[in-house]
Image: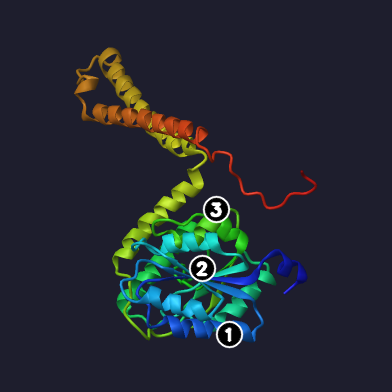
Amino acid sequence: MSKRLSQSFPVELSLVIPLLNEAESLPELTRWINRVLTQHGLTYEVILIDDGSTDDSWEVIEQLAATDTHLRGIRFNRNYGKSAALNVGFKETTGRVVCTMDADLQDSPEELPELYRMITQDGLDLVSGWKKKRYDPLSKTIPTKLFNGATRWISGIRLHDFNCGLKAYDSRVVKSIEVYGEMHRYIPVIAKWAGFRRIGEKVVQHQERKYGTTKFGLERFVYGFLDLMSITFVSRFRRRPMHFFGALGTVSFLIGMLITLWLVGEKVWHSWIMNLATRDVTAQPLFFLALVAVVIGVQLFLAGFLAEMVQLNGSNRNDYLVKERLNLK
């Protein structure tokens, strides 16, 4: 660890660990973390976020913190979800590097020193774990593969395991992003759109669950896909909504107008020039489809205009992430 980094941050590594009903695993987990990081000479802090546990998790955290000064605890009044826990935990970190992991002992603390090295020495902004060999049932692994494939295709980020809880971040990343809903799965996507494009991957060991049961069901993949659509749209068009709504509205309006002009032209050609009997323009079903396209186009354009007005009047309309400043007061 360089002297400059040591002076800039109180600790070298911050660990953010969300948990829900993990009272049995916490003592073993914290001892394991302490042993690994002490052996590697890393100064660290562990922030445990109790996400509304109904067992004795908070009491266990209090007992552990009484004898271990590295531990800090946050307790939610009810279950808000992993994204909320991470978002709150990120705000409390003071380390040069921030790592996240699950509290169920399926993520190995042995991976932490190498993740730390990849951030500080390899210059990566974010490193995501890849559980290449998993100890999960097929009902979980197959949907996970489909989910990861869809996310790679939409985001353009070549990671194998977006949902792995074991990740490492440069502290600038976690201080610059906001995680909400079920967005914890898409932190690499959020980071990329914030300008942190040096994203790496590391194969990590996946442990079999030792205590308790999984807290996630298949519905998370449905919610996850909807969140992927949301974060993709927001990331690309938050500051320029007219580019999205206006473009769709213009295309729809032009299609409607072209169809209308074609129907009118056809009517003029057949009835006035060729002296043939034809139906009125308004008697043709295609005319009403054209009318709907024109109306939808106008509505989309107005939606984009109103979104632009909201954006221009937003308090964070000119909030931009500045990487460095030189000789500025």
Q: Amino acid at mark 1?
A: Val
Task: Give the camera-side residue of 91 and 116.
Answer: 91
Q: Position of residue 134 (x, y in %)?
A: 41, 81
C-alpha distance separating marks 1 and 2: 27 Å
Residue beneath the point at 33% across and 20% down: 265
Q: Amino acid at mark 2?
A: Leu
Task: Give the camera-side residue of 26 and 56.
Answer: 56
Q: Amino acid at mark 3?
A: Trp
Residue holding disc 1:
36
The answer to whether residue 29 is left or right of residue 269 is right
- Write down the quadrant of residue 220 in the picture: bottom left
Residue beneath the point at 56% across and 60% down: 174
Label 2 environment density (alpha carbons within 10 Å; few <14, some 14–19, many ≥20) = many
Q: Earlier in the sequence, mark 2 or mark 3?
A: 2
Q: Earlier in the sequence, mark 1 or mark 2?
A: 1
Front position among marks 3 and 1: 1
Point out the residue furthest to the right here. Answer: 327
Can you say whether 126 is above or below 181 in the image?
below
Classify mark 3: helix, strand or loop. Answer: helix
Classify mark 2: helix, strand or loop. Answer: loop
Does residue 321 appear anywhere in the picture?
Answer: yes
Residue holding disc 3:
193
Front position among marks 2 and 3: 3
Residue holding disc 2:
159
Does residue 197 appear anywhere in the picture?
Answer: no
The answer to whether residue 11 is left or right of residue 190 is right
Can you say whether 294 is above or below 197 in the image?
above
Can you say whether 326 is above or below 14 in the image?
above
Q: Earlier in the sequence, mark 3 or mark 1?
A: 1
Front position among marks 1 and 2: 1
